[in-house]
Image (cartoon, rainbow, N blue to C red):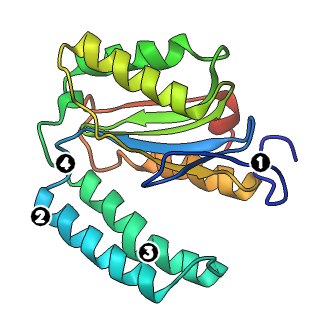
Amino acid sequence: MPGFYNPHGETQKHGVKLPHWQQGEVIQFITFRLADSMPRAKLHQWKEELVIWKVQHPEPWSEEIEQEYHRKFTWRLETWLDEGYGACLFNDPANREILEQILMHDHDKKAIHHSWVIMPNHIHLLFTPLVPLEKLMQSWKGISARRIGLSSIWQKNYRDTLIRDAGHFANAVRYIRRNPAKLREGSFTLWQSERAQAI
C-alpha cells in the first residue's frame, strides 16, 4: 500500500554509527531531542547494556527479539525523555513557536505532516518525507538552533521508524497524542492532520 514500508522494496540508508532508513515517500515516525535531555550516567549505562545485548542477539532479529529490543532499550529512553531532564528549552512558548513555523513552512513542500508534538526537551513527528530524510533533519535542527539563538541545542542523532501499515500508523498517532498527557497546559504543542484526528 502506498505510504507504508515494503520489506521487499529498495531502502536507502545513511549514517554509519546508527543507520537511518528511508524508502522513498514511506511514512516515518521520528524522535529527536535536545542535547541535554538525557543524563550522561543513564545514557552511558544504557549504551553499555545495549552493546552486551546486541552481542547476545545478532541480527537479523525475529519479531519477538525486535519487540524485546524495543522494551529494553527504545521505550526506556522514551520514559527518560518524558521525565523532563535538561533545560527544557521548549517549555518556552516562543521557542516552540519557532520550531512550529519551521516545521509548517515545509508542510506539503518537503514533508507531509500527519502529527507531531513538541515536548519540553524532545520532538515526535509522524510525516511523509518528500526529500531525503537526512536533509530534512539537518534543515529542521540547524534553522531552529540558529533562530533560537543557541549553536548546539540538539543531540546529533535521531530515532527513525518506517511505518509498516495502517495499524502501525494509528499506534504512532495515539502515542504522539498521549505523550504530553502528564504535562501542564501550555508546556507543549500538539498538531494533528485531519487523517490523524480521525483516529
Q: Give the mark nearer the N terminus: 3 vs 4.
A: 3
Q: In terms of image quadrants, where is residue 180?
A: top left
Distance from the alpha carbon under mark 3 to that under mark 4:
20 Å
Residue depicted at 48% across the width and 20% down the height: 103
On the image, numbered disc 4 is attached to which residue?
Answer: 84
Residue 190 horizontal side relative to residue 181, left or right: right
**In the rendered structure, which amino acid carries the disc numbered 1?**
Phe
The answer to which of 158 and 165 lies nearer the viewer is 158
Residue 41 horizontal side relative to residue 147, left or right: left
Q: Residues within 10 Å of mark 1 (few under 14, many from 20)?
A: many
150 lies above or below 124? above
Distance from the alpha carbon under mark 3 to that under mark 1:
23 Å
Distance from the alpha carbon under mark 2 to that under mark 1:
37 Å
Q: Give the mark nearer the N terminus: 4 vs 2.
A: 2
Residue depicted at 74% across the width and 35% down the height: 25
Quarter of the figure with the C terminus: top right
**In the rendered structure, which amino acid carries the disc numbered 2?**
Ala
On the image, numbered disc 1 is attached to which residue?
Answer: 4
On the image, numbered disc 3 is attached to which residue?
Answer: 71
Residue depicted at 34% across the width and 82% down the height: 52
91 lies above or below 98? below
Q: Give the mark nearer the N terminus: 2 vs 1.
A: 1
